[in-house]
Image (cartoon, rainbow, N blue to C red):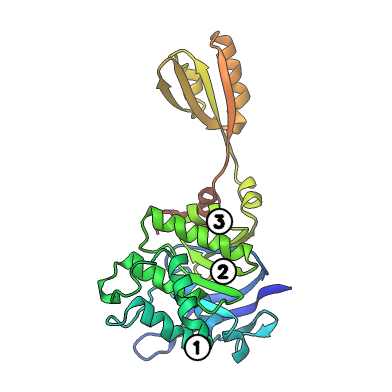
Amino acid sequence: MAAIEIIGLEKTYSVGFWRKRPKRALLPLQLAVEEGEIFGFLGPNGAGKTTTLKLLMGLVFPTSGSARILGMEWSDPRVKAQIGFLPEQPYFYDYLTARELLEYYAQLSGVPAKDRRPRVEAVLHRVGLPDVGGVQLRKFSKGMLQRVGIAQAILHEPRVVFLDEPMSGLDPMGRREVRDLMEQLKHEGKTVFFSTHILADAEALCDRVAIIHLGELRGVGVVADLTSSVHGRVEMVWQGTVVPLSIRALGAECHVTGDTVRAVLAEENQDAAIETLRREHLRLISVIPVRASLEDYFVQKLKPEEKMAGVTA
């Protein structure tokens, strides 16, 4: 059974001074996320990622279409007990401690009174904050607040976890810990749906990803399958410091390192480059395919005039 089914979900806002000009934030979206997978929802800023999550959470209402979560309509109150949500910019009461805030959320989520304290302590350890539970949130860094936000999202043991930009504000070590946590949630049988524009995190984590831009779904699938459709390159290494002009003419990026040369060039030019090395009596050491990255696929899916915005978002 699909954990999340999005069926033609669409959102149009009224903008302008008199609110008479329609703006489509999300075009009709068809998407399914299977139970127990980590699903990445990728796109540059303003692509429609947060709008989609808000629709699924019931924070805004769709113009048309519907969605089902764990086989229930997204608007069914029973769904709320089965999902956890981290918004993109969480806001918490500054003068509460992390422990007090999580106990408050535990009560709201229906966690039995006898289980609240041990559950809070356990989740503080899971997000790497075991020693600051008694510190007021106003003294926390942005990264620490992000961890508290993740803690409240998983506190009540939801079956589906929605995370909007969960790596925001985290240092490299914090990002690694969040990735480990998401993989642990998957091993526990939970479904993780997270949005991001940090492609390296998605490539390392996700079973499948979807690319969205300007409210439109541009591609969806397993990362390996998506990147296989992007034309690849090869790295050639040969002995010596000589770089034949005919190899540079093939568009190769050449670097001399010690007594070897490394050249990266398009795969279709590989045979011509090997023939050149043979003709010049240069000893070939290796030819290694350069695997296409998710970034390559991502950029390919953007319109030409929007490529730069997509890379820097």
Q: Position of residue 247 (x, y in %)?
A: 50, 21
Q: Residues within 10 Å of mark 2 (few under 14, many from 20)?
A: many
State the residue position of label 2: 193
- Most foreground residue, 304 or 12: 12
Residue 258 x/y as whole percent? 40, 17
Give left or right: position of 69 versus 153.
right
Q: Amino acid at mark 3?
A: Leu
Which residue is identified by label 3? Answer: 205
For residue 113, the mark is 1
N-term mark: 1 or 2: 1
Q: Mark 2 or mark 3, which is nearer the start of the sequence?
A: 2
Quadrant for the N terminus in the image: bottom right
- In this orientation, which residue lies closer to the viewer: 49 or 243? 49
Q: Quadrant of residue 281?
A: top right
**Coordinates of residue 131 in the picture (x, y in percent):** 35, 67
- Cα distance, mark 1 to mark 3? 35 Å
**SS of the residue under disc 3:** helix
Seen as rendered, the residue at the extreme top is: 281
**Mark nearer the viewer, 1 or 3:** 1
